[in-house]
Amino acid sequence: MNPLLDGIAAVGRGTLGVCVVAGRLALFAVEGVSHIVRPPFYLRSFLRALVEIGFYSLPVVALTAIFTGMVLALQSATGLARFSAESAVASLVVLSVTRELGPVLGGLMVAGRVGAAMAAEIGTMRVTDQIDALNTLSTNPMKYLVAPRLLAGTVALPLLVVVADVLGVLGGFIIATLKLGFNPGVYLQNTIDFIHTDDVVSGLVKAAVFGFLVTLLGCYHGYRSRGGAQGVGSATTSAVVAASVLILAFDYVLTELFFAR
Amino acid sequence: MSCVPPKIRIRGLMKSFGDKLVLDGVDLDVMAASSMVVIGGSGTGKSVLLKCVLGLLDPDDGVIEIDGQNILKMPRRERDGVRARIGMLFQNGALFDSLAVWENVAFKLLAERKLTRADAHSHAGDYLAQVGLAASVGELSPAELSGGMQKRVALARAIAARPEILFFDEPTTGLDPIMGAVIDGLIVDCVKRLGSTAVAITHDMASARRIADRVAMLHKGRIVWEGPASALMNSGCPVVDQFTHGRREGPIQMELRR
């Protein structure tokens, strides 16, 4: 027994394990996407997923956005006051919300709500033979269950982020004008002056990627769940944790792509 | 020996999960329009055998022929075509929770897009009637049904596409004896009406005798006895005799973890 070799072996096993999971996930994603573009299309499943992901996530995303905008205005006003730069509050709020906080917090909220539910639903279908039943009924489960959800997630999250952007800025506006004494007209003019199309578009692209990731991981962990209720519970946890971590990791990558000079 | 080729012919089927050998060279013939029941203890690989034939599991070795064609050597598209001729009643029904009962029954009809939803709804009512359920049951969700009703709906879904081959995985498990007899009667009626070839797996001896034309016993990954249902209780095979009479002593030793 050599502790050093044992340690190296453990690291090697862990690395291989990560590679195996990444490979499986990539193959799952490729297969899911391939079914989005190949008929038959399950429009009813897509619309149902779109309502589930988009419409029913609206309250939680809206509340998160408005409170985030309010806190951001309050924090930035007190922070910027140290440099006599209170006039930058409007620009800071709008850029932070559209570039970062709207898509990231929206993605995390949807990961918690939708990713978990998706993993639980598909996981339950797996352990109760419903996915095998689909196969026996001439229906490809990847096409019927996964592809519509992937597409719905990719479409729904940018729509949610548009709402989050508006409400986040509104939250900042409410605090800035009602509590901090900013002139409403000047605040709005500052907001409009500083916002560019790129800021909004980059946030929406991030949202589309995050929506895809959340649904991909929900479907993947649900689809591969085993072992009854405990397996479904583990799949749900894994889906939310993995989606949250990947959202933050991809946020960095996309920010680097969009804004690094 | 009959010179009519079997509908399903299985030879040397092997399947293991890790170190555990589950199927160790299964040989089995099922003649067209007959009912074969495979009996065996829990964990002997009966469900694995069915899943291999259905294509839900890939066997490690062996031959599975349907109408003389080895489905394991077929391209995926062709194999899907053969699979489409098979209906399956799962042990727990496996009804889709998110769909109404009528959508479950008409699922394959809707998936094949040969019918409008209105026509499929009407057909679902007909199939529900065939398993003794009112058309109004079609509007309920599966969660609102009792275990026996779920089995009936699952049977209606299995027969709705008029399959050539029907598989039944433990059709009476979890049902009281009367409901079990009702389900067995429905299975026999449906199989006769469709002229299908049926393969059921069970460890319920009463159910096996009601459904089967022939019975095969799976033990330690192999078929150790096969014969007519009338000979089941007097097979002369010590393994079958112990199993059918539920004796503790005999060649079958339960694996106990200590």
Image (spheres, rainbow, N blue to C red):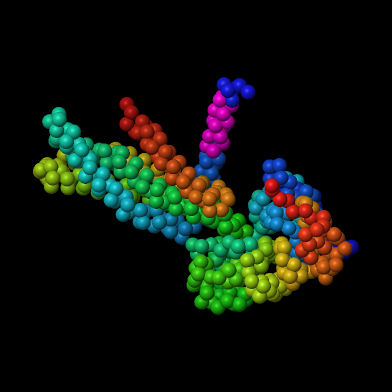
Q: Nearer the viewer, residue A233 or B4?
A: A233
Query: Main structural element of the magenta stretch: helix, strand or loop?
Result: helix
Q: Give the total number of marks visible in the rendering.
A: 0
Could you tell me which quadrant the N terminus of chain A lies in? top right
Taking the spot 28% from the left edge, 41% from the top edge, the residue there is: A98
Left or right relative to B242: residue B148: left
Which residue is located at x 49 percent, y 50 percent? A233
Report the quarter where the C terminus of chain A lies.
top left
A211 in relation to A261, above or below: below
Residue B185 visible, this orientation = yes
Farthest residue toward the right? B1
Q: Does the magenta stretch include residue A21?
A: yes
Most foreground residue, B252 or B197? B252
Question: Which segment is the magenta one?
Answer: A7-22
A180 is higher (above) or lower (below) than A113: above
Residue at (70, 54) in percent of width and height:
B43
In the rendered image, residue B218, in percent from the top left (x then y), is placed at: 77, 57
Residue drawn at x 44%, y 53% is A117
Q: In which quarter of the image is residue A206?
A: top left
The image shows residue B177 at horizontal and vertical percentages of 67, 72
Q: In this view, which residue lies farthest toward the front?
A: B258
Answer whether residue A193 is visible to the viewer in this image.
no
Q: Where is residue B73 in the image (x, y as percent from the top left)?
A: 73, 48
| Relative to B83, B6 lies left or right | right
Image height of A120 relative to B203, above or below: above
Q: Position of residue A157 (x, y in %)?
A: 37, 48
